[in-house]
Image: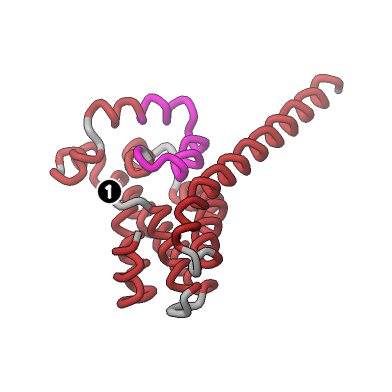
Amino acid sequence: MDHLIYFFNCYGYFAVFFILLICGFGVPIPEDITLVSGGVISGLGSANVHWMLVVSMVGVLIGDSTMYWLGRIYGEKILKFPLIRRIATPERFLTVQNRFERQGWKLLFIARFLPGLRAVVYLTSGITNKVSFIRFIFVDFCAAIISVPIWVYLGYFGAKNLDKLHSQIHKGQMIMWGILIVGGLFALWKWKKSRQKKNSL
């Protein structure tokens, strides 16, 4: 994280945007640490935290959309590209493809919180062509608007105490999963309620 903070301090919003963009391509740089580091430089006065949030959201969405369009344009041929082949191994692609057939857009939403499979899921969604780009970007935005602000503002409020911030990152992950679980239970309750209402008619 210290290296990212130094890099972001030097190059500001552009650096955060660039790193998030390549994170979307599956480059093994933790997206959460990148977002927290962007929040930290905002807390240290090198950037405006609200603009940092906007830049982070745009970087995340463009990075994810690029993977989608690579799959959409090139189809399964993209899996032969050396860089993509390392990210989307045949076994991983097959696993995600099978899950995508069963879960569709729900897997897209969950993928934002699964760093190891995120890029493969977005690539597969483009290859299978079962999800329109409008739906893809909408679902991705709904997931990102949960995770991105948590990480950016966590970095912002923890900027003055980096030692404590390291321990707070785990809590940030727990908060996100808590939101997802509560949201999932609420959606399940609404779905069951609507089914009961239909059955009673």
Residue 158 percent location from the top left of the image: 52, 63
Q: Is residue 29 left or right of residue 159?
A: left
Q: Which residues are magenta?
A: 96-116
**Quadrant showing the N terminus:** bottom left
Q: In front: 92, or 159?
A: 159
Residue 55 percent location from the top left of the image: 44, 69
**Which amino acid lies under the numbered mark 1 shown in the image of this protein?**
Pro
Q: In front: 162, or 21?
A: 162
Q: Is 43 placed above or below 25 here?
A: below
> Does the magenta portion include 130?
no
Point 24% across, 40% down: residue: 87
Q: Is 118 placed above or below 40 here?
A: above
Q: Is 44 placed above or below 110 here?
A: below
Q: Is residue 115 left or right of residue 106?
A: left
Q: Is residue 40 left or right of residue 6?
A: right
Point 76% across, 25% down: residue: 195
> Does the magenta portion include 109?
yes
Residue 108 percent location from the top left of the image: 46, 40
Q: Is residue 182 left or right of residue 83?
A: right
Point 29% across, 70% down: residue: 7
Give SS at disc 1.
Answer: loop
- Main SS type for the magenta part? helix
Q: Residues within 10 Å of mark 1 (few under 14, many from 20)?
A: few
Q: Quadrant of residue 189?
A: top right
Q: Which residue is mark 1?
A: 28
**Quadrant showing the C terminus:** top right
Residue 197 percent location from the top left of the image: 83, 26
